[in-house]
């Protein structure tokens, strides 16, 4: 039996996925959490085999939760979940070490396949995400500049775009204000911008808001 922890900030999504997965004979959802902070607490008590992690959540966020799980519980496999199947998020998660990525629009059969695949020690990308990664690599001349950001820089950029203050970001990511500002100015340099207003304009131009 594959023990699964489901992390998503929407109750209806949690309830729906939990019911569908529990109908599969070799999968059991042992816990559900609405945020990364509670997911870490749950894992510290009883680690599951696989974590289904929504990457777009308030507070700590999916990226940081994935980072901490991978560092503190290397035996736990992680599959990223998102309503989006394009943009830089899937690549950034894979670079982080996540075992797979599935769009919430995927059928439950694909989610089941993803769970079984990462449980076997392999990586899995749902079909839509895999196709988009191929097309995005073919269109390198028009590639979004956001692809060049490191995973941590992307996290900071996403939180800035969601209107979070430096203090908010510091508290969510457990970093000092100085360190957050360092990441902020690094991403400015990579994107060739000078302030948050220009960051917003660039995000609109490259449809980056659609991925956060």
Image (cartoon, rainbow, N blue to C red):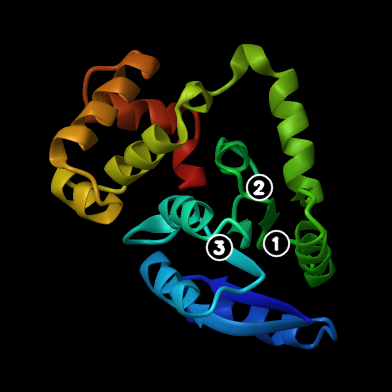
C-alpha separation, residue under disc 3 versus residue under disc 2: 15 Å
In screen coordinates, is 80 left or right of 163? right
Earlier residue among tags 2 and 1? 2
Element class at badge 3: strand
Q: Which residue is mark 2?
A: 85
> Looking at this view, is 152 or 141 the one in front?
152
State the image coordinates of residue 62 (x, y, percent, origin top left).
46, 56
Q: Which residue is mark 3?
A: 53
> Looking at this view, is 43 or 79 the one in front?
43
Nearest to viewer (mark 3 / mark 2): 3
> Looking at this view, is 163 or 100 the one in front?
100
Q: Residue at x 14, y 48 (%)?
A: 167
Nearest to viewer (mark 3 / mark 1): 3
Q: Which residue is mark 1?
A: 105
C-alpha separation, residue under disc 3 versus residue under disc 1: 15 Å
Earlier residue among tags 3 and 2? 3
C-alpha separation, residue under disc 2 versus residue under disc 1: 9 Å
Contact check, label 3 and label 2, Cβ < 8 Å: no
Q: Quadrant of the N terminus?
A: bottom right
Element class at badge 1: loop
The 10 Å Cα crowd at callout 2, few under 14, some 14 to 19, many 20 or more, is: many
State the image coordinates of residue 37 (x, y, percent, origin top left).
36, 68
The correct choice, above or below, for 164 with respect to 77 in the image is above
Q: Quadrant of residue 155?
A: top left
Q: How many marks?
A: 3
């Amino acid at each position: 039996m594959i023990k699964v922890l489901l992390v998503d900030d929407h109750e209806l999504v949690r309830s729906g996925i939990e019911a569908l997965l529990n109908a599969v004979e070799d999968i059991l959802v042992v816990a559900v959490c609405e945020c990364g902070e509670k997911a870490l607490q749950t894992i510290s008590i009883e680690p599951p085999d696989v974590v289904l992690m929504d990457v777009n959540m308030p507070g700590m966020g999916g990226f940081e939760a994935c980072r901490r799980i991978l560092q503190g519980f290397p035996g736990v496999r992680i599959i990223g979940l998102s309503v989006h199947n394009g943009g830089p998020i899937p690549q950034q998660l894979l670079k982080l070490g996540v075992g797979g990525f599935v769009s919430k629009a995927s059928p439950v059969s694909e989610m089941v396949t993803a769970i079984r695949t990462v449980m076997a020690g392999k990586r899995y990308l749902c079909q839509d995400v895999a196709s988009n990664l191929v097309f995005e690599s073919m269109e390198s001349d028009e590639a979004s500049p956001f692809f060049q950001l490191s995973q941590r820089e992307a996290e900071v950029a996403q939180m800035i775009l969601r209107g979070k203050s430096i203090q908010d970001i510091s508290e969510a990511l457990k970093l000092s204000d100085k360190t957050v500002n360092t990441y902020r100015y690094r991403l400015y340099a990579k994107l060739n911008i000078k302030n948050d207003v220009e960051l917003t304009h660039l995000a609109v131009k490259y449809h980056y808001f659609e991925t956060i």
